[in-house]
Image: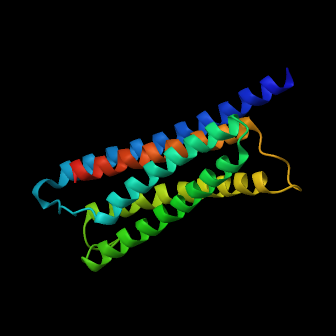
Amino acid sequence: MNEIKKEQSYKSMLMFGLFSIVMLFAGLTSAYIVSKGSMGSQWELVPLPKAFFYSTIIILISSVCLFFSNKYLQQKNERYSKQLLLLTVIMGFGFFITQYVGWKSLVDSGYFFVGSSNASSYIYVFSGLHLAHVIFGLFFLIQSYFKMNSKFLSKETDLTFKIKNWFWHFLGFLWVYLYCFLSFWN
């Protein structure tokens, strides 16, 4: 009975966190639409860097790797589960790098966080806040990887691994949403 309550509390905390993140980005996308509408023809279009497209591919591949890592863990095949989890972590760092390259591309094109255009400011805010959540998610994936490889740390439980997976998949979905939103509304 205690395990059921623990599982319910973990899931509730995750749902509360995900809902908070959804509301944050819903508010930001609404602000973007209102800002663009109020500026009319003065709104400067900012082309998204190609690196953001590559970020999208990377985070989708990382979600697929994590999905199969979880599947192998459930089948008690720890070797493949660990390898795919490590690949997921590497892809997470790849996402981080492509975001940096995207920001550098924006700066090289004359679009800064402040002072160049409202659209570029929003792009930095969207991608920066998302990246902060990715760093948070990477922390938990790295923690899972070390737990799977250590004889001294407590083993990763199915429940905590699932919750970390759900968070990572959510971040992938969120980035796809943000990329599509910025591609079509910009």
Residue 150, percent from left and from top? 82, 57
Quadrant in which the C terminus is drawn: bottom left
Q: Residue furthest left?
A: 41
Report whether residue 84 is seen: yes
For the N terminus, the image quarter is: top right
Quick check: can you spot residue 126? no
The residue positioned 70% from the left and 55% from the top of the image is 145
Q: Return the x and y of residue 106 as percentages of the image width and height.
A: 30, 72
Could you say which is closer to the camera, residue 121 or residue 101?
101
Apparent side of residue 67 relative to residue 1 in the rendered image (left or right): left
**In the displayed structure image, the side of residue 142 where residue 44 appears, left or right:** left
x and y percentages locating residue 95 in the rendered image: 46, 61
State the image coordinates of residue 129 (x, y, percent, origin top left). Answer: 47, 57
Up the image or down, 168 lies above or below 3; here it is below
What residue is shown at x 66% (from left), y 47% (from top)?
Answer: 81
Colour basis: rainbow
Residue at position x 33%, y 51% in the image: 179
Q: Quick check: 123 above or below 18?
A: below
- Residue that protrudes farthest toward the right in the picture: 152
Task: Please tell me whether residue 129 is drawn above or below residue 168 in the rendered image.
Answer: below
Compared to 146, does 166 lie above or below? above
The image shows a total of numbered marks equal to: 0
When asked about the image quadrant of residue 49, the answer is: bottom left
State the residue in front, 162 or 39. Answer: 162
Which picture quadrant has residue 4?
Answer: top right
